[in-house]
């Protein structure tokens, strides 16, 4: 608690000390801003009503369409560079399974319908259970990134924060835009949108269509192809029906198709490992690497084999639809209904060895030769060359009643319902070249198929009270129930005439129900019309789930069902913030300090199964403490020069967590006593979280001739090194990205030359702790019959390697935009 007091006190001292000098300067005549010389106000809907960003007592980073165009931001990954305490990397392609957004030191372990993300995306308030990296930014009015637990307002899977995409509202007058971009690496994009009245005063429309492609830049040395290509086609339409002055309805329908090549990943070999080797004194260690991982400029992947199954990479067809109804009645009351769906049809084909080899073939070396072809076909060959397909559907509806906003006591109440389904329709493997008599390129069944379903019901409400002239207090509360189901369905061979070479296990069905109660309490003080302080105390939960496989109970010999269910992870967050407009609106400064206490943390633990193999399962065994500071400053420095700067510090540290793998690396012999003595990672930093982040954006603009202007802008973003895992050994290294833009614009035209990552920073996008058996496996030490040591029984014989995801390097291009 001492840390909480220190952090919040320091933040309060900073925010109280700042305004004095600023407002003294503000009163000077030279500091007065003329009309139009102000930072534009941004209206957000973070609390599901329209409010000025600077008046909402929540830490929010918002980007308007104009801002995103000026900076050339085209993805959620781009936005994260300029958002304090938020990181997002499409490390393994635009793929739901590998998206790991982190917010304020909290990140995600397992994704999917049942295993939701820590930071969830909404489009016009509609829950997106699928990939967030595929959402297009071109058709948006703005993006709102909300930090800290948002469970009281948004419910399920907003444990660490929420991302709210707001699409364009159909306009009352006819307008539109045509834009086109061409850049290096065969990159081309185009967008056309138009909006206006169909029946003036009755029906307005908005329609848009876009194309975006990137040709990739890394060569696959296996077949000479280029990886990391991406292509997106999208179309969206909206109709706004203004039935009366008090009632309107908005209907939206969209379609998006993505077709991406294999993500660029290289495998750092075990021969580069420099610590934690297996020895008689450390009989269970699997080797590791300490320090900044290596960088690579090419890959070696089985894309040629994946071409036999439709091609390597991720492909998705997404259909979206929504209906929003707003009815104003009485003396300012509002009844809102928001219903929508998202349907994804996804193919994921990739080489999971990351190195164009078959990691499992070594296991057949000690098998009699006459059995190798059968076992290779049944179990091993091609298990890392994966071909998967699934369908995911998210449906949600919310009914909300709100009181008039111009009264001292305001309230909102509502009901929410969500149902999500994810059904695997294919999980196959492709046999690889080997010496066991099995032809390469055969497509075989790999594993059982799974069906996941989540049903979420919630009741929520809030009360806001202006109890004094400048004081407001708010209480929000949400009760929710999650019903989670997972069913294993026995997979069949791709070719029905080709029976499986082994007897598959029968299907299994698991169901669990989880209840949660998540409040948020807010106290706000408005010292002046331009200076706001707030204090937030909020609770967030990560939905629970269950493990498909669990170890056997040593007494009964049956599966240990006590380890089946995984409880909800909980966080209490304490935040103190300030929002201000300075120098007569020529600058805005927002500060926030926070402390979070995480309990019942869902952590991954390795268990040994009945057949001697191991599985990774989730348990509620950890505690984490997070504290940090965020700053955002925007300013009109001169008549022609604008600036936006951000900085965040995040200290995310385990307080309690016993890891068997940590114990193994430290020399454990596998006994319970050794695991407890050597397995603690208390004091270690949470992986994937940069301690420091910063960004700076400058734009200079001057008249050129008549109605034309020229402009130049530059940006730089810094992200500190991130650890790959809880052991705090291998890390990514610091990343610094620099971009620039030079252009001219008129009343309708805007043409610019741009550069991204112009200094070729090659810091890996992500680092995945993995395996590497290309140079053999580890020695297994049998226990001494007398002393019992050394002992590697049940320990993996697979040495560690590291998957290194390669970044996009320098790129130059041109954009032309015409507005009508």
Image (cartoon, grey):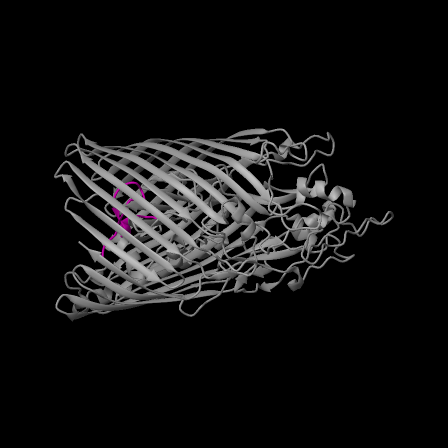
* Residue 220 in sight: yes
Residue 78: x, y in percent? 38, 57
Residue 394: x, y in percent? 41, 35
Q: Is residue 417 above or below residue 373?
A: above
Instruction: Give the residues drawn in magenta, as a range.
Output: 40-58
**Residue at image point 30% right, 51% down:** 138
Q: Quadrant of residue 155?
A: top left
Q: Quadrant of residue 501?
A: top right
Q: Nearer the viewer, residue 141 or 447?
A: 447
* Residue 600 in sight: no
**Residue at image point 70% right, 34% down:** 552
Q: What kind of secondary structure does the magenta stretch mostly adopt?
A: loop
Total numbered labels: 0
Q: Nearer the viewer, residue 164 or 622?
A: 164
Residue 413: x, y in percent? 31, 32
- Say whether residue 386 is left or right of residue 180: right
- Say whether residue 768 is left or right of residue 401: right
Residue 787: x, y in percent? 85, 50
Q: Is residue 43 magenta?
A: yes
Q: Is residue 282 above or below residue 658?
A: below
Q: Is residue 787 magenta?
A: no
Q: Is residue 655 above or below residue 241?
A: below
**Residue at image point 42% right, 35% down:** 393
Q: Nearer the viewer, residue 132 or 465?
A: 132
């Amino acid at each position: 608690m001492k840390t909480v007091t220190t952090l919040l006190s320091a933040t309060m001292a900073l925010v109280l000390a700042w305004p004095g000098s600023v407002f003294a300067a503000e009163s000077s005549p030279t500091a007065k801003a003329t009309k139009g010389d102000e930072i534009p106000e941004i209206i957000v809907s973070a609390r599901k009503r329209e409010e000025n960003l600077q008046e909402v007592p929540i830490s929010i980073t918002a980007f308007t369409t104009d801002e995103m165009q000026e900076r050339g931001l085209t993805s959620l990954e781009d936005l994260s560079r300029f958002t304090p305490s938020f990181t997002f990397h499409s490390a393994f392609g635009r793929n739901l399974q590998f998206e790991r957004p982190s917010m304020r030191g909290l990140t995600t372990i397992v994704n999917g319908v049942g295993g939701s993300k820590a930071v969830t995306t909404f489009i016009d308030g509609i829950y997106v259970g699928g990939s967030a990296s595929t959402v297009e930014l071109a058709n948006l009015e703005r993006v709102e990134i909300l930090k800290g637990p948002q469970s009281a307002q948004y419910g399920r899977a907003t444990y660490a924060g929420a991302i709210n995409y707001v699409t364009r509202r159909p306009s009352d007058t006819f307008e539109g835009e045509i834009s086109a971009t061409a850049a290096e690496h065969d990159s081309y994009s185009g967008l056309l949108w138009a909006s206006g009245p169909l029946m003036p005063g009755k029906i307005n429309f908005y329609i848009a269509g876009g194309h975006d492609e990137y040709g990739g830049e890394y060569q696959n040395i296996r077949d000479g192809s280029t990886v990391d290509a991406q292509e997106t086609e999208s179309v969206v339409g909206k109709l706004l029906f203004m039935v009366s002055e008090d009632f309107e309805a908005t209907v939206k329908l969209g379609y998006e198709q993505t077709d991406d090549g294999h993500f660029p990943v290289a495998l750092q070999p075990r021969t580069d490992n420099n610590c934690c080797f297996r020895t008689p004194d450390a009989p269970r260690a699997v080797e590791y690497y300490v320090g900044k991982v290596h960088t690579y400029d090419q890959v070696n992947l089985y894309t040629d084999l994946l071409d036999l199954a439709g091609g390597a990479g991720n492909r998705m067809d997404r259909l979206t639809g929504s209906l929003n109804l707003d009815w104003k009645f009485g003396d300012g009351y509002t009844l809102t209904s928001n219903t929508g769906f998202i349907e994804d049809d996804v193919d994921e084909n990739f080489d999971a060895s990351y190195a164009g080899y078959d990691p499992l073939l070594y296991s057949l070396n000690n098998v009699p030769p006459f059995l190798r072809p059968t076992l290779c076909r049944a179990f091993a060959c091609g298990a890392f060359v994966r071909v998967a397909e699934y369908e995911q559907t998210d449906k949600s509806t919310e009914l909300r009643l709100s009181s008039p906003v111009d009264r001292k006591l305001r309230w909102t109440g509502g009901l929410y319902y969500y149902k999500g389904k994810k059904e695997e329709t294919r999980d196959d493997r492709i046999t690889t070249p080997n010496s066991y008599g099995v032809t390469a390129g055969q497509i075989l069944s790999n594993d059982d198929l799974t069906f996941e379903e989540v049903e979420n019901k919630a009741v929520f409400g809030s009360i806001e009270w202006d109890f004094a002239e400048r004081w407001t207090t708010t209480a929000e509360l949400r009760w929710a129930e999650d019903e989670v189901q997972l069913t294993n369905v026995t997979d069949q061979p791709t070719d029905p005439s080709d029976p499986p070479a082994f007897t598959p296990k029968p299907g299994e069905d698991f169901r669990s129900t989880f209840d949660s109660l998540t409040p948020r309490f807010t106290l706000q003080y408005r010292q002046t019309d331009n200076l706001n302080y707030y204090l937030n105390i909020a609770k967030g939960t990560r939905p629970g789930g269950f493990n498909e496989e669990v170890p056997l109970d040593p007494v009964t010999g049956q599966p240990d069902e006590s380890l089946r269910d995984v409880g909800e992870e909980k966080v209490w967050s304490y935040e103190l913030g300030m929002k201000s407009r300075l120098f007569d609106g020529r600058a805005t400064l927002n500060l926030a300090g926070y402390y979070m206490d995480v309990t019942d943390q869902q952590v991954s633990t390795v268990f040994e199964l009945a057949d001697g193999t191991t599985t990774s399962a989730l348990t509620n065994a950890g505690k984490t403490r997070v504290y940090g500071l965020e700053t955002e400053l925007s300013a009109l420095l001169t008549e022609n020069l604008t600036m936006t700067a951000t900085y965040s510090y995040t200290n995310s540290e385990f307080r309690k967590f016993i890891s068997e793998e940590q114990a193994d690396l430290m020399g454990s012999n596998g006994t319970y006593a050794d695991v407890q003595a050597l397995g603690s990672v208390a004091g270690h930093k949470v992986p994937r979280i940069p301690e420091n982040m910063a960004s700076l954006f400058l734009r200079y603009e001057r008249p050129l001739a008549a109605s034309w202007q020229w402009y130049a802008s530059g940006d730089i973003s810094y992200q500190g090194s991130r650890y790959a895992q809880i052991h705090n050994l291998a890390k990514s290294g610091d990343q610094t990205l620099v971009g620039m833009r030079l252009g001219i614009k008129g009343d309708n035209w805007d043409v610019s030359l741009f550069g991204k990552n112009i200094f070729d920073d090659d810091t890996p996008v992500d680092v995945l702790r993995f395996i590497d058996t290309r140079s053999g496996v580890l020695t297994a030490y049998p226990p001494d019959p007398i002393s019992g040591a050394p002992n590697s029984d049940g320990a993996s014989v697979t040495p560690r390697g590291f998957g290194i995801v390669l970044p996009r390097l320098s790129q130059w291009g041109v954009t032309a935009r015409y507005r009508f």
